[in-house]
Image: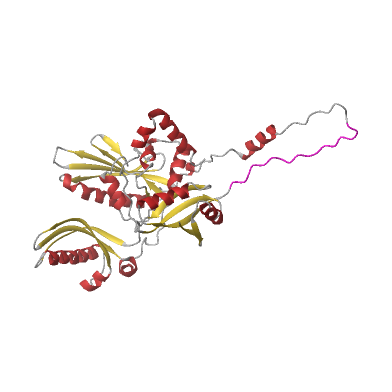
Amino acid sequence: MLLGGLGTALGIALLAVGPARLMAQIEGDRGIVPVASTSDIEVIGIEVNTTGANAEEARLAGWKEAARKAWAKAGGPGMDDGRIQSMVSAVVIEREQIGPRRYIATLSVVFDRARSGQFLGSTNGGKARSSPLLVIPVLYSGGTAQVFEVKGPWQRVWAEYRAGNSPIDYLRASGGGGDSLLLTAGQPGRRSRVWWRNVLDQFGASDVIVPEARLERQWPGGPVRGVFTARYGPDNTFLESFTLTANDEAGVPKMLNEAVLRFDQIYTRALNDGRLKPDNTLNVRTGIDPGLAALIAAGNAPEATPSAAPTASPTATASATPTAAPVAEVRTFTVQFASPDAAAVDAAMGAVRSAPGVKGASTTSLAVGGTSVMRVSYEGDIGALADALRARGWKVTVGSNALSIKR
C-alpha cells in the first residue's frame, strides 16, 4: 500500500506522456546531496581583509582573523589565538580573492562541539527537538516555480545548511531521481492525506515544512528583492513572512544564506510555541476496517448444501468468527552502509526501500567515501528486517536498534 499511490501516479504519467518523456524529467545531474548534520557550531558570513609577505601568509592570517571574529560572534570568552585555533574543525570558503600579498574573503568557521561546548553552551539548551520534517524549498524566480527540476540556488543553500545545532530535524531530499517528480512546487497545494502520507513515508518524515522564496529583480543588473514565507503541514499553513534585499545578482547567495537562518529561527519559535507539531490527520488508515473485513469474510464463506434425505441426528457446528489479521507495528531503525560513491548510495537505498515491510527510508547522514546512515520505517521487528536484507544478498550485522549492511 505504501508504494500504491506512487505506482498509480507513475502509471498514469506513462500513459499520458509516454516513457521517453517521463524519463527525460528524471534524467540528468539535477540533485544536490545535503551535507551531513552534526552538532558542531558553525558561524557563517565572516569577512576578512588581510595582508602578508606572500599570498600564503596573507591567506593564513585571514583564516586566523576569521577564527577570532567567529569566536567572538558565537559569544566565546576571551582567549589567545592558539586555543581558539585548537577548537576549529573546519573553515568553509564562501567567497575569496587572493592577490600576491593580500587576501579578501567571506568565510564560515566550524568549531568542534566536544572542545568548544563548555564555553559556548549546550547544543539545544535543553529544549525538545522536532519530529522529522520533510523540507520542500520552493523558489519563484523569473515567472516560474521550481523545487528540484534544476540545480537552483534555493535548493543549494538548504542542502549546504548545517542544521546540527538546530532543534528542527530537517529531512532534505537530494533532488535526484524521482524526487523531482514527487516534490514539485504544486505538491504543497495538495490536500489529500493519503497522498501526503505516501510521499512522507518515502523519506521517513512525520510532516512537511515549505520555505518559499520569491525573487523580484528591479531591472537587469540591479537590486534583487527577496520575499520569504514560512509554511508547514499538508494544508500549507502560513507561519511568518519577511523581506531581504541584495544590491545586485552577486549578492543573492549571501541573501539566501541569511534567509535560511531566519527560517530556522521562525520554525524554532513555532516549535517552542507548540504550533510545529505533526498533523494528526496524516495518520490515515489505508487498510480495510477490521469489522468490515469480518463481514466480507462471512459473506464469502461457502454455504452448506441441503441434503436430499434428512439425517437421523443432525448436529450444528459452530463456526469461528472471522477476525482480521493483526497489523504489525511500524518501527524505526537505523541502518549503516558503506558509501564509496553516489551509485553505492542509490543501490543501498533502492535495496532497502524494496524490501518487504519497509514503509520508508531516508538518509540522515551522508558521507560519500565513508559510511552513511539511513533511517528506516519497518513493519515488524529488527530481526525480520535483517532477514529481508539478507535475502537480497546483503551481509547484515544486528546491533541495538540498528543494522550494519554491506555486500
On-image quarter of the C terminus:
bottom left
Q: Nearer the viewer, residue 24 or 156?
A: 24
Does 31 sit above or below residue 14?
below
Q: Is residue 200 left or right of residue 304?
A: left
Q: In the figure, residue 296 lies in which quadrant?
A: top right
- Asked whether, in this view, residue 322 is left or right of residue 333, the answer is right
Magenta stretch prevailing secondary structure: loop
Query: What residue is drawn where x is 52% and y is 54%?
Result: 390
Q: Identify the residue shown where x is 18% and y is 48%.
A: 251
Rendered image quadrant of residue 149: top left
In the current view of this chain or complex, which residue is farthest to the top? 308
User: Residue 249 sits in which quadrant?
Assistant: top left
Name the residue furthest right.
312
Q: Is residue 132 visible?
A: no
3 versus 118 height, above or below: above
Name the residue at 51% across, 50% down: 378
Percent across and percent down for residue 385 are 53, 53
Q: Position of residue 228 (x, y in %)?
A: 27, 43
- Image location of residue 11, percent across then percent down: 45, 33
Is residue 257 shown to the viewer in this render?
A: yes
Start-end of magenta stretch: 311-327
Residue 363 horizontal/vertical position (percent) = 40, 52
Asked if residue 15 lies in the magenta stretch, the reply is: no
Q: Nearer the viewer, residue 203 or 218?
A: 203
